[in-house]
Image (cartoon, grey):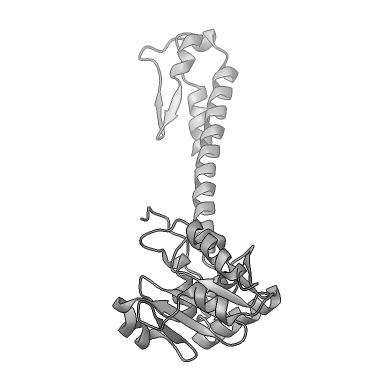
Amino acid sequence: AAEMDILSAAKLQVQSPADLRFCSIQGGVRKMPSSPTSMSAVPQALIFGRLVRQTIVEKRRRRFRYTTRAAASAFASSTTPVSAQTQSPPSMATRLGAVKSRLQQLGVHALIVPTDDPHLSEYVPDCFARRAFLSGFTGSAGTAVVTTDGEARLWTDGRYFLQAVQELPDGWQLMKSGVDGTPAVDDWLAAHLKKGQEVGIDAAVHPASFVLKLRDKLGQQGVDLRCLQSNPVDDVWSSHRPPFPSALTR
């Protein structure tokens, strides 16, 4: 049908070469000057060539739009790994054991996992809820500590004592912050670890004030503080990790 339109249009008449700019095909309708004259003023080949070029350009535009939509659809469907769609997340015991194994590979003896994300947001996106992934505790405040010698402890305040008791799996111990006799995280680490051992942190998710205080406290006992290149929890989370937020967060 397009070829027939081109051939038919080539036989139409125009007034002058300037009128060629009015020759177009839009939705199959040919638009020409209202008072056509002889074709002798303009070679038929010139009109034919112009219409052919218009048709080719239009076909290319349509093909580009189709290809772009198809590529966007394919990219969207590939953003969620197949393994994450078909496999269930590892059990709580498996997660804890895998993190401890990762610490041993790194040569680190303890890991601090806070609630915060890299922006210290008020509401942490699911993709940064590392403490909840590792410990099962979903409260909005708390700090987890895991050591290679089998310790797994969670610090939280009185608002979440009951929730923590209900959510913490076997192998975890609740540390009730604010209760007499409960040491702070830095005090417990300084007392529990031996000289020469290292505590690992992801520096992106800790306030600078906490890091400086922790470094000084551990240094008094000969324990080193080490900023890790990658977060060991992320290494275990892997393909089961939720996607990053696509909208504003606070």
Q: Quadrant of residue 179?
A: bottom left
State the residue at coordinates (50%, 90%).
Answer: 171
State the residue at coordinates (68%, 79%).
Answer: 104
Image quadrant where one finds the C terminus: bottom left
The number of callouts visible is 0
State the residue at coordinates (45%, 87%).
Answer: 173
- Image x and y of residue 87, in percent: 53, 80
Q: Quadrant of residue 194?
A: bottom right
Where 2 falls versus 101 (above or below)?
A: above
Report whether residue 82 is seen.
no
Task: Out of 61 and 180, give the one closest to the viewer.
Answer: 180
- Image x and y of residue 35, in percent: 37, 11
For this orientation, the residue located farthest to the front is 220
- Image x and y of residue 188, in percent: 51, 78
For this orientation, the residue located farthest to the bottom is 170
Task: Out of 110 and 86, give the one closest to the viewer.
Answer: 110
Task: Out of 220 and 227, give the one closest to the viewer.
Answer: 220
Report whether residue 5 is seen.
yes
Relative placement, left or right, of 234 versus 125 is right
State the residue at coordinates (61%, 73%).
Answer: 221
- Image x and y of residue 125, in percent: 41, 63
Where 197 falls versus 41 (above or below)?
A: below
Where 72 falls versus 200 (above or below)?
A: above
